[in-house]
């Protein structure tokens, strides 16, 4: 077996020694050169074996890219039609779904919104896909997302803007833009989105549908392209609370591969029940014992029309169901975004860019085919990346080379302060927190006839995540539901709970839904 790694020459080693400040002498370099081929024998062994693709039991055709007339909001990337041939009688029997285009669906192209991955076809199904098909779900395709999912707008996908179905001249939100649009316009019953800073809740809020970011690790991320392991979430988007609960129940639970579930399970030391759909179906208006906390800091910087709609919904909710409402405060809520920002910046650089969409030092899923395609894609197509990715890639490299991981380490430690702050409210004062999902309604998409204003482009991507990002940082579950009137641009009210309190969150969301505010 020849080694797949060409050993470095003496001049290579000298250059490496200099760049790493090792000050190795010529004699040392010569001895290193002799040792290295033996060290690389491990690569011979690994390279010799080919990993067979996953065997997927559900037959499928390769699908197709829809024409513009079939894709008026540019929400689809690829269309297909995949369903188990057996009538499972499962929770998703008769339901149609779309998948955010960072989720592996074997045999169907995946682009993750970026030319870097154009032409990539996964060779395995994500855990969530396997569970959906087993439960009788019918997958109709892949939904466009933002370029490498790094935007809360809907204007960075390399195939063009994703349009809001309420008003096509406006943003649909991101990064799970296509997923929310396809649900909102009725092309699918439900969809899966991903969330690192608000990417399920932002488009769900802007498009007027229900979106839930579960507890971190509750839904396995196996088979989904990561951004930052401590921030990565996948969860349901649906037109109503019952379908949201239905999909969550199907995809939740450990899979033996993604270890993140165990972190929070051990923290809570409790049994986890996935009886979400029955809780919602059996709901009889009995939420009167819930203590609702209106988070004061969640309304800072929020536009007046959003504040009025959210406050009106809270008042009607509390008066209708005789709920206990209390204004609560956690000043750290306003600072959580800064800590989140450091973790997102450096974690994204390590995993997404330098790691070629893979992570190390964790026992978790990785895919060699994806890693190699991403590596070659960054070499050939990095020039086509969105401005959000370009600035993150440059700044991430600059910080790593000049400051190491000093600030990432500090931010990771500070994360616990914010977690304890929210959990103290849940332990001592309230059961659930409520606040606006976003500080404002959807804004117009950039004018493509004019030269792109990079400052405006980046601000539209990252400017509205002050309320959503803290709960990616802490891993707490959060749901958005529309409370705007008919015909208006949607306004999301966000409900946040303690770890694994998705059932309680969904019951309160059902109570809001019954008020028929939209």
Image (cartoon, rainbow, N blue to C red):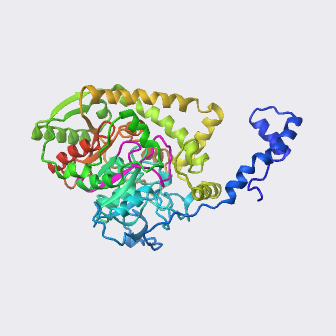
Judge whether residue 421 can be spotted in this image: yes
Q: What secondary structure predominates along the stretch shown in magenta?
A: loop
Which residue is painted at 30% across and 47% down in the image? 441
Asked where in the image residue 507 lies, by quadrant, the reply is top left
Front position in the image: 196 or 476 = 476
Front position in the image: 176 or 22 = 22
The image quadrant where one finds the N terminus is bottom right
Which residue is painted at 56% across and 65% down in the image? 119
Question: Is 386 placed left or right of 323 in the picture?
Answer: right
**Relative vertical location of residue 460 with respect to residue 85 in this rendering, above or below:** above
Q: Is 3 in the magenta?
A: no
Residue 404: x and y in percent read 62, 33
Residue 432: x and y in percent read 25, 36
Range covered by the magenta-colored residues: 214-241
Front position in the image: 410 or 465 = 410
Q: Is 218 in the magenta?
A: yes
The number of numbered badges drawn on the structure is 0
Front position in the image: 56 or 309 = 56
Question: Is 208 placed left or right of 459 in the picture?
Answer: left
Residue 468: x and y in percent read 36, 40
**Relative vertical location of residue 109 with respect to residue 222 in this rendering, above or below:** below
Residue 352: x and y in percent read 55, 48
Judge whether residue 443 can be spotted in this image: no
Q: Which residue lies furthest to the right in this view?
A: 27
Question: Is 88 placed left or right of 109 in the picture?
Answer: left
**Relative vertical location of residue 225 with respect to residue 350 in this rendering, above or below:** below
Which residue is painted at 63% across and 54% down in the image? 375
């Amino acid at each position: 077996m020849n080694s797949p790694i060409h050993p470095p020459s003496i001049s290579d080693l000298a250059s490496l020694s200099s760049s790493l400040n090792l000050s190795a002498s010529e004699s040392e370099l010569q001895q290193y050169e002799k040792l290295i081929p033996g060290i690389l024998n491990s690569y011979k062994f690994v390279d010799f074996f080919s990993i067979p693709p996953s065997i997927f039991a559900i037959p499928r055709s390769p699908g197709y890219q829809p024409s513009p007339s079939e894709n008026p909001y540019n929400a689809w990337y690829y269309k297909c039609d995949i369903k188990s041939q057996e009538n499972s009688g499962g929770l998703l029997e008769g339901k149609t779904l779309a998948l955010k285009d960072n989720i592996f669906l074997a045999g169907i192209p995946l682009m993750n919104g970026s030319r870097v991955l154009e032409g990539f076809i996964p060779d395995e199904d994500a855990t969530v896909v396997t569970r959906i098909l087993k439960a009788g779900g019918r997958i109709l395709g892949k939904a466009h997302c933002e370029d490498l999912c790094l935007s809360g707008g809907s204007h960075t996908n390399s195939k063009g803007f994703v349009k809001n179905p309420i008003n096509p001249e406006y943003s649909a939100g991101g990064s799970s833009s296509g997923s929310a649009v396809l649900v909102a316009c009725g092309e699918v019953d439900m969809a899966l989105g991903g969330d690192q800073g608000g990417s399920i809740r932002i488009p769900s809020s802007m498009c007027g549908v229900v979106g839930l970011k579960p507890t971190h690790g509750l839904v396995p991320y196996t088979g989904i392209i990561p951004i930052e392991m401590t921030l990565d979430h996948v969860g349901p988007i649906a037109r109503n609370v019952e379908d949201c609960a239905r999909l969550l129940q199907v995809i939740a639970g450990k899979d033996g591969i993604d270890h993140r579930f165990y972190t929070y399970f051990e923290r809570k030391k409790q049994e986890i029940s996935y009886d979400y759909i029955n809780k919602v179906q059996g709901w009889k208006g009995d939420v009167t014992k819930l203590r609702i906390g209106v988070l004061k800091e969640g309304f800072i910087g929020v536009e007046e029309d959003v504040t009025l709609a959210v406050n009106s919904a809270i008042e009607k909710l509390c008066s209708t169901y005789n709920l206990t409402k209390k204004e609560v405060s956690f000043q750290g809520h306003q600072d959580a975004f800064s800590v989140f920002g450091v973790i997102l910046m450096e974690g994204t650089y390590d995993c997404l860019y330098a790691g070629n969409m893979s992570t190390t030092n964790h026992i978790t899923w990785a895919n060699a085919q994806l890693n190699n395609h991403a590596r070659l894609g960054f070499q050939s197509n990095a020039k086509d990346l969105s401005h959000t990715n370009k600035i993150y890639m440059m700044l991430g490299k600059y910080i790593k080379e000049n400051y190491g991981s000093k600030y990432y380490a500090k931010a990771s430690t500070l994360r616990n302060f914010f977690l304890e702050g929210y959990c103290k409210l849940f332990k001592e004062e309230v059961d659930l927190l409520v606040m606006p999902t976003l500080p404002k309604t959807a804004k117009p998409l950039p004018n493509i006839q004019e030269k792109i204003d990079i400052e405006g482009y980046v601000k539209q991507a990252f400017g509205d995540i002050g309320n959503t990002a803290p709960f990616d940082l802490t891993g707490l579950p959060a749901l958005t539901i529309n409370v705007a009137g008919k015909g208006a641009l949607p306004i999301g009210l966000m409900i946040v709970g303690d770890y694994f309190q998705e059932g309680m969150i969904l019951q309160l969301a059902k109570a809001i839904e019954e008020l028929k505010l939209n």
